[in-house]
Image (cartoon, helix red, strand yellow):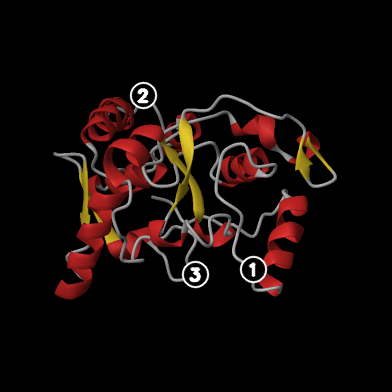
């Protein structure tokens, strides 16, 4: 789960609308996918997230279609597009009155949103746009099981909060583990056998970046030129 920089704002028409709502202290209009800014928010987030699920880093959409050249006066140039994900509220308790709050929105894999997370509460430990968020400080990766775990160097209470958010956000959802394992085992073996350098391996990745970097550290893979 990578750190995300959500200051990269392309949906400026939405941002102006949201800032006005917040300045006037008004509740947000009902959250629905037919809202005029829905596609703009999704497109902006997927561009920031490099087309990946904000939590699992699974590939959802080719983000090269979402860059600045595709925006006109702060709105995305298409009225709709297909992507395998949902616009997701990190803290579900904010959805009713603050359903369009930028800081609470991410694009997540559809299965994570509908089959796992739902309205479960989060503990704000694993929030990918938080200033304090550092996956390498909070998490570690077990290459044998291909599961994310709390960093055992952290205090026990923090480890418990990390584990809670790992489970709620689906970092170890079974289908994610299976896909991540299949993808990264092959790539790791290519580096071990010197069929690819680490540079080449990194360039070939399109998902699961954090897991791969933690594997590199755990297995002490060398930068073979």
Residue 107, given in percent of the width and then of the height, sits at 49, 43
Mark 1–mark 3 distance (CA, rounded to whole Å) = 26 Å
Residue that badge 3 annotates: 131
Q: Which residue is drawn at the image coordinates 55% and 40% (left, top)?
A: 50
Mark 2–mark 3 distance (CA, rounded to whole Å) = 38 Å
In this rendering, position of residue 53 left or right of residue 151? right
Residue 103, given in percent of the width and then of the height, sits at 54, 61
Q: Foreground residue, 71 or 151? A: 71
Q: Which residue is drawn at the image coordinates 64% and 73% (left, top)?
A: 25
Q: Which residue is drawn at the image coordinates 53% and 55% (left, top)?
A: 99
Residue 95, given in percent of the width and then of the height, sits at 47, 56
Q: Of callouts 1 and 3, which one flags the residue occurring earlier in the amino acid sequence?
A: 1
> Which mark, by number, is residue 195?
2
Count every numbered label the image shows and give the total.
3
Q: Which residue is drawn at the image coordinates 70% and 42% (left, top)?
A: 36
Q: Secondary structure at mark 3?
A: loop
Q: Secondary structure at mark 2?
A: loop
Mark 3: few, some, or many residues within 10 Å (few <14, many ≥20)? few
Mark 1: few, some, or many residues within 10 Å (few <14, many ≥20)? few
Q: Is residue 222 in view from this perspective? A: no
Mark 2–mark 1 distance (CA, rounded to whole Å) = 58 Å
Mark 2 against mark 1, which lies toward the viewer? 1
Q: Of callouts 2 and 3, which one flags the residue occurring earlier in the amino acid sequence?
A: 3
Residue that badge 1 annotates: 26
Q: Foreground residue, 128 or 24? A: 24
Q: Of callouts 2 and 1, which one flags the residue occurring earlier in the amino acid sequence?
A: 1
Callout 1–callout 3 Cβ contact below 8 Å: no
Q: Is residue 88 in view from this perspective? A: yes
Residue 33, given in percent of the width and then of the height, sits at 57, 38
Mark 2 against mark 3, which lies toward the viewer? 3
User: From the image, which quarter does the C terminus lie in?
Assistant: top left
């Amino acid at each position: 789960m990578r750190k995300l920089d959500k200051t990269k704002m392309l949906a400026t028409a939405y941002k102006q609308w949201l800032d006005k709502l917040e300045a006037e202290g008004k509740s947000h209009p009902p959250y629905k996918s037919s809202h005029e800014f829905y596609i703009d928010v999704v497109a902006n987030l997927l561009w920031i997230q490099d087309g990946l699920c904000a939590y699992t880093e699974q590939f959802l959409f080719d983000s090269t279609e979402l860059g600045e050249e595709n925006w006109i006066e702060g709105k995305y140039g298409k009225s709709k597009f297909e992507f395998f994900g949902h616009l997701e509220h990190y803290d579900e308790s904010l959805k009713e009155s603050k359903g369009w709050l930028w800081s609470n929105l991410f694009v997540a894999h559809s299965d994570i949103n509908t089959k796992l997370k739902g309205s479960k509460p989060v503990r704000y430990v694993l929030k990918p746009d938080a200033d304090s968020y550092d996956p390498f400080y909070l998490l570690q990766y077990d290459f044998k099981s291909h599961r994310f775990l709390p960093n055992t160097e952290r205090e026990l209470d923090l480890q418990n909060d990390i584990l809670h958010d790992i489970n709620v956000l689906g970092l170890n959802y079974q289908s994610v583990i299976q896909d991540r394992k299949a993808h990264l085992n092959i790539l790791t073996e290519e580096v071990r056998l010197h069929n690819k350098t680490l540079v080449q391996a990194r360039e070939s990745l399109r998902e699961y970046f954090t897991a791969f970097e933690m594997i590199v550290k755990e297995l002490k893979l060398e930068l073979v030129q």
